[in-house]
Amino acid sequence: MRIVQISDTHLTHMEGVTNENFQKLVDFVNDVLKPDLVINTGDLVILSPDSDADRECARAAHERFAAPVRIVPGNHDVGMTGDEPWMGIATTTKRITNFRDGFGTDRFIELPDSTWALIGFNSELLSTGLPEETEQWTWLERIANEVRGRCVALFLHRPLWSPMPDVTDHEIAVHDADRDRILQIFSDSCLKLVASGHLHRFIADQHDETLTISAPSSAFIVKGGSLGLNQLGVVEYRIEGEQIEAYFRSVPTLVEDEPFGLAAFSETLASIEQSRGAVV
């Protein structure tokens, strides 16, 4: 089985570089990689979870993939957990509802054969205290019981482990308590892979027997720092038997830029500033 993970696509109805890059990405995935499944690990929209137009643009754009597509949200899709979320955009029930209405769900499970379980869930619900978080924990516990003994691959937006040993900020990775609870839930299965996005870099690591992958963005690079591979692209996974291998794939002709060099980002930031506090 071949899976392509994309992430941090940051699409907008205002068009621009991020949308142009996504069109090239879709063509490359369809014509060259030809996977059995495409998974987007979040931040589908450019910045704000409150833009219905951006959400609809992202939904329509994903219909161009030839393979089935599964999606989990990022902080720009539903908001961020924590006492001081970026730009004050916190995860709320309304934002979760809007995402589910637009994309159908914020989690998934795929059982491609008798050996594997591919599970995606909403990392931006963790530690929110929302009713939807309780519902998701119940769902994860039920799913883990159903796939006991299988090889498991988890897909979420925010990493389970911070790739920076000295940085445990929840803006980088999920809270330690949430990570430990997830690991406990899947302790009776063989957790082979945890795949995330959020960092806009390709980072491959290992935690005990679990391969951890942070997928690059297709929209723009974030300059600074020395973590991983700072290039635009996608991740290709090849599954054979109980083995899984991950490969960074560069997508030809993608345009690299920083976010605030894009007019669409400036316009959306201004819109967010005007509407802060309006959505609860």
Image (spheres, rainbow, N blue to C red):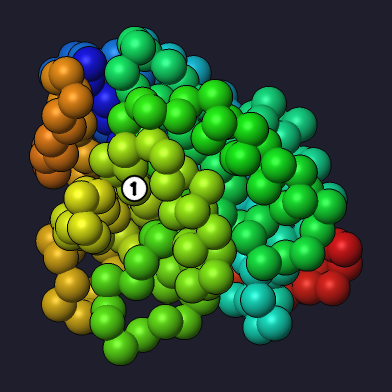
Q: Amino acid at mark 1?
A: Val
Please report the residue visible at 76 percent of the width from the left and 51 percent of the height from the top: 134
Residue 74 in the figure: left or right of residue 226: right
Residue 207 in the figure: left or right of residue 7: left
Residue 257, percent across and down? Answer: 27, 62
The answer to which image quadrant residue 251 occupies is top left
**213 versus 19 height, above or below:** below
The answer to which image quadrant residue 224 occupies is bottom left
Residue 103 in the figure: left or right of residue 152: right
Residue 44, percent across and down? Answer: 51, 44
Quarter the C terminus occupies: bottom right
Please report the residue visible at 42 percent of the width from the left and 72 percent of the height from the top: 172
Quarter the N terminus occupies: top left
Furthest residue in direction bottom, as rendered: 166
Front residue of 216/187: it is: 187
Residue 254 visible? The answer is: no
Residue 182, percent across and down? Answer: 51, 53
Please report the residue visible at 31 percent of the width from the left and 18 percent of the height from the top: 115
Q: Name the residue carrying label 1.
A: 194
The answer to which image quadrant residue 108 occupies is top right
